[in-house]
Image (cartoon, rainbow, N blue to C red):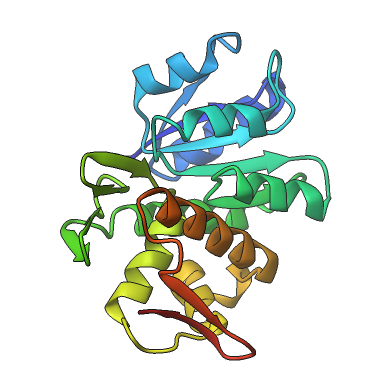
Amino acid sequence: MKKILIIEDEEIVANELCNLLNNSGYETFLLEDFKDAKEEILKKSPDLILLDINIPYKNGCLLLQELRKESAIPVVMVTSRNSETDEVLSMSYGADDFITKPYNPNILLLRIAAVLKRSGSFSEIQTYKELEIHLQKGIIKREGKEVILTKNEMIILNYLLSHQNKIVSRDELMTDLWNNDEYINDNALTVNISRLRSKLKEVGYPNAIETRKKVGYILS
């Protein structure tokens, strides 16, 4: 049974989420210590986190940014703000998906299932030149340097790697990421590509992903 940690300070909303997820076959936990949220998350080691942006002590995006330094646990951001800026910020900090309140319960469940499916699809180590790509752990390694990737970044890198030296369109990447038109978001893809490039640069491959204008991307 997959474990989902709910980080939501509105008690009514948190309980509704618990009931919805429990009835859908998930095991749920509520974050109790918002002050030391990151430590609580790492201690509970959930399979997925539902993270509200507006929480006590620390903005949800900043908490996510801190968490990504130590963990690639899948995160779905939940917020009452209907703002494209929030979505881009969430994705840039490492969120795997994003949904706004009031959310449709069925859509939320579909998104959770899609993120969990993606997170469970990696089970091997691949290589790119001198780079080790640990799909299950969500990390890339080269000469002792280790960098954590989010699930979306890993999906993009894995797809580009499996089509190495071939041009991959944005539509192909978005289809592979979300498996359904409902999850396609052009801004989120741009953010993820940019963030992936920065992390590849950290391990010595600043030009690994080339942009082919009006066509797509290529890993050469």
Which residue does the image show at 37% across and 31% down from the upper left? 46
Which residue does the image show at 54% across and 64% down from the upper left? 193
Pick whichever, 141 or 151, lies toward us. Answer: 141
Residue extending furthest toward the right: 82
Q: Image height check: is 119 above or below 65?
A: below
Please state, as top left, top right, bottom left or bottom right, where the C terminus lies in the image: bottom left
Q: Is residue 71 left or right of residue 20?
A: left
Q: Is residue 211 left or right of residue 199?
A: right
Q: Position of residue 76 (x, y in %)?
A: 56, 44
Which residue does the image show at 35% across and 50% down from the upper left? 203
Pick whichever, 125 or 11, lies toward us. Answer: 125
Pick whichever, 146 or 53, lies toward us. Answer: 146
Task: Answer whether residue 70 is visible to the viewer in this image.
Answer: yes
Q: Image height check: is 4 above or below 44?
A: below
Which residue does the image show at 38% across and 58% down from the upper left? 154
Please state, as top left, top right, bottom left or bottom right, where the N terminus lies in the image: top left
Q: Position of residue 135 (x, y in %)?
A: 26, 55
Q: Position of residue 140 (x, y in %)?
A: 29, 50
Q: Image height check: is 146 above or below 118?
A: above
Q: Position of residue 141 (x, y in %)?
A: 25, 47
